[in-house]
Image (tube, helix red, strand yellow):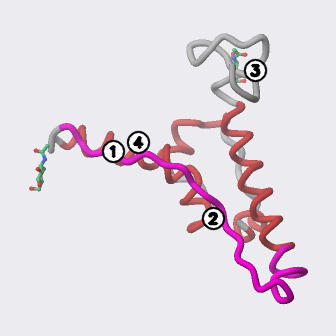
Amino acid sequence: MTPPHRCSPPFGNCPKGNSSTEAYIAAHHILLAHASVVQLYREKYQETQQGFIGINVFAYWFVPMTNETEDIIATQRAHDFFLGWFVDVLVFGDYPGIVKKRAGTRIPSFSKDESKQV
Ligand SMILES: *[C@@H]1O[C@H](CO)[C@@H](O)[C@H](O)[C@H]1NC(C)=O
Ligand SMILES: *[C@@H]1O[C@H](CO)[C@@H](O)[C@H](O)[C@H]1NC(C)=O
């Protein structure tokens, strides 16, 4: 078992956790924490340290199996979930529409200020 030792079927069999909700909550807080630390660094340390700060997004790339519309849409959806889940937030201030639609109430939302900060 790998950290954080929280999951639920069908994604794993852990003593505690909920795989259909907790990943969205954890990712949300990673994004907010990132935004907060970037702001702190820029305000207090960057000028004297002349450093850089960023986030590393580990991603997969998908190619449609065929050129059928269904496969192309599925590929876009995979990109939205694997990459857009983080990158859309950093670039546009919100999750991709399809991610919000599919996740429904399981995904937290950003306030206007949080959206601007991320
Ligand atoms: C996970 O949370 C969802 C939404 O609250 C709930 O419907 C589901 O039953 C929970 N699953 C587990 C394994 O606790
Ligand atoms: C889909 O179409 C593109 C552009 O015509 C082509 O390069 C690609 O090989 C096609 N992919 C498949 C899986 O047929």
Residue pointed to by mark 1: 62
Mark before the other along the chain sequence, 2 or 1: 1
Q: Position of residue 67 (x, y in %)?
A: 15, 44
Q: Is mark 1 within 8 Å of ligand 2?
A: no
Is the residue 23 above or below the residue 27 in the image? above
Q: In the image, is 62 to the left or to the right of 81?
A: left
Mark before the other along the chain sequence, 3 or 1: 3
Q: Position of residue 41 (x, y in %)?
A: 83, 74
Type of the residue with mark 2 = Gly
Mark before the other along the chain sequence, 4 or 2: 4
- As measured in the structure, the alpha-carbon distance from the residue carrying label 4 to the one carrying label 2 is 19 Å
Q: In the image, is 61 to the left or to the right of 65?
A: right
Is the residue 48 above or below the residue 59 in the image? below
Q: Residues within 10 Å of mark 3 (few under 14, many from 20)?
A: some
- As measured in the structure, the alpha-carbon distance from the residue carrying label 1 to the one carrying label 4 is 7 Å
What residue lies at 72% left-to-right and 13% top-to-bottom? 14
Q: Residues within 10 Å of mark 1 (few under 14, many from 20)?
A: some
Type of the residue with mark 1 = Phe
- As measured in the structure, the alpha-carbon distance from the residue carrying label 3 to the one carrying label 1 is 29 Å
Q: Residues within 10 Å of mark 2 (few under 14, many from 20)?
A: some
Q: Position of residue 107 (x, y in %)?
A: 66, 40
Residue pointed to by mark 2: 93
